[in-house]
Amino acid sequence: MSQNKIGTPLQQSATKVLFLGSGELCKEMVIEAQRLGIETIAVDSYENAPAMQVAHRCHVIDMKNGNALRAVIKLEQPDLVVPEIEAINTDTLVELEKEGVHIIPTANAAHLTMDREGIRRLAAETLKLPTAKYLFAETLEEFQSAVREIGLPCVTKPIMSSSGKGQSVIKNQEDIEKAWKYGKEAARGNGAKMIVEEFITFDYEITLLTVRTAFGTKFCEPIGHIQINGDYHESWQPCTMTEATKQQSRDIAKKVTDALGGYGIFGVELFIKDGKAIFSEVSPRPHDTGMVTMATQVMSEFELHIRAILGLPVNTTLVQTGATHVIKAANEHWNPTFDITEAVQIPDTKIRLFGKPLCKPGRRMGVVLATASTIDEARAIAEKTAHLVKIE
């Protein structure tokens, strides 16, 4: 979409963007869209989700229900539909796109990337990119057989899930049934299968934010990150790597994002082992590890995404070294309060509280951004500050 004219929000001329999923990443996208005068509509499965707190309008629906999804899009008649999570009926998005609805980046990209089987087969079998060895299993017997063939240790997860839910590392025979049960319980959407992957002892892993624009593909500097139980815990930018490895990572990212098509930002996850890049996953939207760009780049990943989908030029320049560390809940309770008295005393930091109304053990409730002259210093400051935020 080349958007050279933008209307006035809440008026007949409005340029409207409807977001499917209203979490913390969508909240930042809504803010960036409104800075450009876009009318924003936030949709999610529960009330008062983070993006709903800043959008012009919101709707609560089951996004896995194709009829409900179709109804809200027909009601709002948006110029663009931006999926922000995986738990969406992407078959309906494919149908709507054929009927003329503009899905970001494309309905096929949303469909493929919500399904680990689809994206892994595209990367490994169609594009011939380096990946971990893998097998898929639909029954416990197939799962046990796949574990034997891949070998121990191995990584298992549902083909449809998010934020590390359902992911296990199987180290011995006793872990197999437990991993199967956990994966099935955490699966999202209609994905009945599990993926069993080779355990790669990588040196480090990165997110390479890749922006497809009307002016060509642009890359952000690599983002290093650490996950715990498959969920993002901290990230930093830039991640130190050789130019050869960086270029190899960019080549892989361009191949997979070109295959998916459309405009917008893609979070391409890669393992780095002995200087070689190995494809892991891709998300056709801003990435949680990319929140660090709110402190490090001329344009954050959220501004890059909004500008790219509108057909506007982007700037991926890195301006300073920075890091993020998540603020996580320890207990489950409603209506939390946050004591930031000590945390706000730390210089060169910013606190972003997401506004989620429900705490759950391990749930991300916010993030700390920190800048410093070195990566190690930025990471240490971000971690210290995050731990000073008390959730009550």
Image: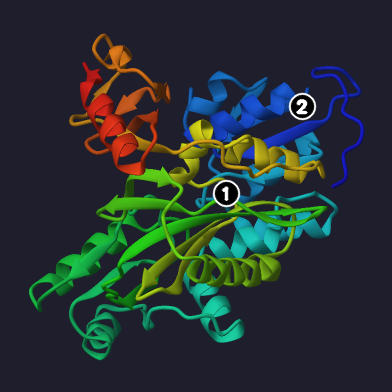
Which of the 4 image quadrants contains residue 69?
top right
- Depth check: give the residue in front, 68 or 57: 57
Q: Please, which residue is most extreme toward the front here?
A: 373
* SS assignment at label 1: loop
Question: Please, is residue 43 above or below residue 257 in the view?
Answer: above
Q: Residue at x 30, y 70 (%)?
A: 202
In the rendering, at what x and y percent does residue 76 appear? 76, 32
The residue at which mark 1 appears reads as 65
* SS assignment at label 2: loop
Question: Please, is residue 264 above or below residue 250 in the view?
Answer: above
Which quadrant, please, contains the C terminus?
top left
The residue at which mark 2 appears reads as 38
Residue 223, which numbered label?
none
Point out the tag, 2 or 1, that comes first from the N-terminus: 2
Q: Residue at x 87, y 39 (%)?
A: 3
- Depth check: give the residue in front, 70 or 337: 337
- With 190 as the anchor, is 177 left or right in this view? left
Q: Residue at x 46, y 65 (%)?
A: 242
Q: Residue at x 39, y 68 (%)?
A: 271
Q: Amino acid at mark 1?
A: Asn
Mark 1: few/some/many CA within 10 Å (<14, 14-19, 20+):
some
* Closer mark to the observer between disc 2 and disc 1: 2
Note whether residue 205 is visible: yes
- With 119 as the anchor, is 38 left or right in this view? right
- With 208 as the anchor, is 258 left or right in this view? right
In the rendering, at what x and y percent does residue 194 appear? 35, 72
Note whether residue 45 is visible: no
In the rendering, at what x and y percent does residue 65 appear? 57, 49
- Depth check: give the residue in front, 74 or 33: 33
- With 77 as the anchor, is 391 left or right in this view? left
Q: Amino acid at mark 2?
A: Ile
In the rendering, at what x and y percent does residue 241 appear? 43, 61
